[in-house]
Image (cartoon, coloured by chain):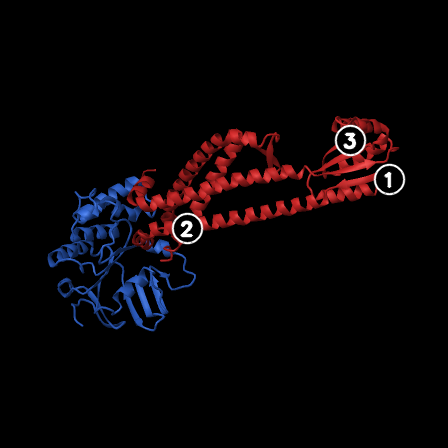
Chain colours: A red, B blue
């Protein structure tokens, strides 16, 4: 720790620029990561909303409808299926037309078909489900918003691709800029590195102090980035609560673990902190490794 | 033993640093490399430290053929060599003790050994009371003493000095050479120099170079080109 502090003190401007670059990169990445995670989970949430509605013929017995429902549920492609019986359909109709007694008089439960509202796990499954239903007997009509589903699919795929490209660009840029900054710092020690090589130092011996210092700066920048992010999250929490009203929770699937990101919780914050620290440590280490390479060829 | 056998070094732009150079230096021998600037003195030293590779020829150091493409003992061999430069190359952000200790630290020596060895060599070079002083507070002669201490500490049995008195006044140069005299017979010492008086006075082996070729190899010679 003493050696790190001494090195920072002896090259304060280079250390400060390396720290600031790391901080801005990590803070930007962190904000981008959280924003994209929110966007991603919101899209995932919205993706579950489009539905296929299948109307059965009036005479279709309930056990036939339940058979279709059970087959769909066992396919693994369906998130949820809601059965709307004739009576429930009539109640919905009454609720919708409560201000129009004339319409209410004209309709009874007998003429309303039973139906299933099917929510798919992913929108890509909706056309398959619709096709499957059309092949079943006793079906009166299958409805689903093909255009909306297609547009949503295009939108989500585009956003994911853009996010991936932007992240890769950000990581690459931060490594390039950080490598250059560390190179400036190391350039001041060129003759020391050459001397160490000539007296028999291993590459690891020479690299170690630079990597440790970069790691220290990377982790310090992560802590600062996370601190500012936490303050911003606390500040904007009431606004988000009103904005996301109606959405009970947002989550993303991380290695088969459903990570809840909204409402904010300790697990999410811990994972964000650990990820930022690891990311900071990795880019700082990679950058200092590349930077020292230049002088180790003696 | 250090042996050069028909060593030639040509640079990509065509200039020749060494041309068919052959010589042998026994263990613990004291040798001066003399010659005008560009004669090839520094190239010989750089080939021993493996900073330069010969274009052709063979170099043997302590039974290792360092020109062999499969030679993998570069680090270990460098740990046997102490180097002294004309411009001292001391680390300005480290004190005298740390500057000398670095020679042992790179080989992973433990702190108690480093402490006792640094103390011992500080006495040899006459800087026993200046261990905690930083280079900016030292004279040129003292800086060269630090460089010598760094080169001789530990098991470094080959000492290479490239113009060690080049930046020093005559009196300090003699003081520095007295330190080399103390080490005589205990290490192989190769000194590249222009200093006629010193070479003449020491009466040690002299390898005289001119335009990359050895023109004289005098067993007890002076500076005679």
Residue toward you, B202 or A186: A186
- Which chain letter matches label 1? A
- Which chain letter matches label 3? A
Q: Are marks 1 and 2 on the same chain?
A: yes
Q: Is residue A91 above or below residue A48?
A: above
Residue A12's x, y, as percent? 31, 44
Number of marks present in the image shown: 3
Residue at image mark 1:
A137
**Residue B172 picture quarter:** bottom left
Which quadrant is the C terminus of chain B positioned in?
Answer: bottom left
Residue A130's x, y, as percent? 77, 42
**Residue B41 picture quarter:** bottom left
Q: Residues within 10 Å of mark 1 (few under 14, many from 20)?
A: few
Residue toward you, A107 or A148: A107
For marks 1 and 3, give the CA distance.
Answer: 17 Å
> For numbered disc 2, what is the local secondary structure?
helix
Sequence order check: which comes first, mark 1 or mark 3? 3
Number of the label disc, if any, that sits on residue A177: 2
Residue A179's x, y, as percent? 40, 51
Q: Residues within 10 Å of mark 3 (few under 14, many from 20)?
A: some
Residue B141 visible to the viewer: yes
Residue B79 visible to the viewer: no
For marks 3 and 2, give the CA distance.
Answer: 58 Å
User: In this rendering, would B203 be left or right of B57?
Assistant: left
Residue at image mark 3:
A83
> For numbered disc 1, what is the local secondary structure?
loop
Residue found at x 60% / y 48%: A158
Sequence order check: which comes first, mark 3 or mark 2? 3
């Amino acid at each position: 720790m003493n050696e790190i502090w001494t090195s920072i003190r002896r090259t304060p401007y280079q250390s400060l620029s390396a720290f600031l670059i790391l901080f801005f990169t990590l803070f930007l990445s962190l904000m981008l990561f959280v924003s994209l995670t929110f966007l991603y989970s919101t899209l995932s949430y919205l993706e579950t909303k489009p539905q296929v509605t299948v109307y059965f013929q009036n005479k279709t017995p309930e056990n036939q409808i339940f058979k279709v429902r059970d087959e769909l549920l066992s396919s693994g492609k369906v998130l949820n299926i809601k059965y709307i019986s004739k009576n429930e359909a009539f109640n919905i109709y009454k609720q919708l037309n409560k201000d129009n007694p004339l319409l209410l008089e004209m309709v009874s439960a007998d003429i309303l078909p039973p139906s299933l509202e099917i929510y798919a796990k992913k929108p890509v499954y909706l056309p398959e489900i619709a096709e499957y239903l059309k092949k079943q007997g006793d079906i009166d009509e299958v409805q689903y918003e093909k255009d909306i589903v297609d547009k949503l699919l295009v939108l989500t795929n585009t956003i994911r691709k853009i996010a991936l490209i932007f992240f890769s660009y950000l990581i690459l840029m931060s490594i390039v800029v950080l490598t250059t900054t560390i190179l400036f710092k190391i350039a001041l020690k060129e003759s020391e590195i050459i001397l160490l090589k000539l007296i028999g130092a291993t590459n690891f011996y020479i690299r170690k102090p630079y990597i440790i210092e970069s790691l220290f700066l990377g982790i310090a920048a992560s802590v600062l980035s996370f601190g500012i992010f936490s303050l911003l999250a606390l500040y904007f929490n009431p606004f988000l609560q009103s904005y996301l009203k109606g959405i009970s929770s947002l989550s993303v699937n991380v290695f088969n673990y459903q990570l809840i990101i909204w409402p904010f919780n300790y697990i999410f914050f811990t994972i964000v902190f650990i990820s930022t620290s690891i990311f900071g440590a990795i880019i700082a280490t990679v950058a200092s490794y590349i930077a020292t390479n230049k002088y180790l060829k003696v | 033993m250090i042996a050069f056998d028909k060593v030639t070094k040509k640079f990509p732009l065509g200039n020749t640093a060494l041309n068919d150079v052959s010589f042998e230096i026994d263990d613990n021998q004291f040798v001066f490399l003399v010659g005008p600037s560009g004669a090839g003195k520094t190239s010989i030293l750089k080939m021993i430290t493996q900073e330069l590779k010969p274009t052709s020829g063979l170099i043997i150091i302590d039974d290792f053929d360092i020109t062999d493409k499969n030679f993998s003992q570069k680090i270990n061999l460098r740990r046997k060599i102490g180097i002294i430069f004309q411009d001292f190359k001391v680390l300005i952000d480290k004190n005298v003790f740390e500057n000398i200790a670095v020679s042992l630290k790179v080989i992973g020596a433990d702190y108690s050994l480093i402490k006792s060895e640094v103390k011992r060599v500080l006495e040899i070079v006459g800087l026993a009371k200046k261990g905690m002083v930083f280079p900016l507070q030292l004279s040129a002669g003292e800086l060269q003493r630090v460089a010598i201490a760094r080169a001789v500490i530990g098991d470094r049995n080959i000492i290479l000095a490239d113009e060690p008195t080049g930046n020093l006044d005559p009196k300090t140069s003699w003081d520095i050479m007295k330190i080399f005299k103390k080490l005589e017979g205990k290490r192989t010492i190769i000194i590249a120099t222009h200093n006629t008086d010193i070479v003449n006075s020491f009466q040690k082996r002299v390898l005289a170079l001119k335009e990359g070729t050895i023109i004289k190899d005098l067993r007890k010679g002076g500076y005679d080109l």
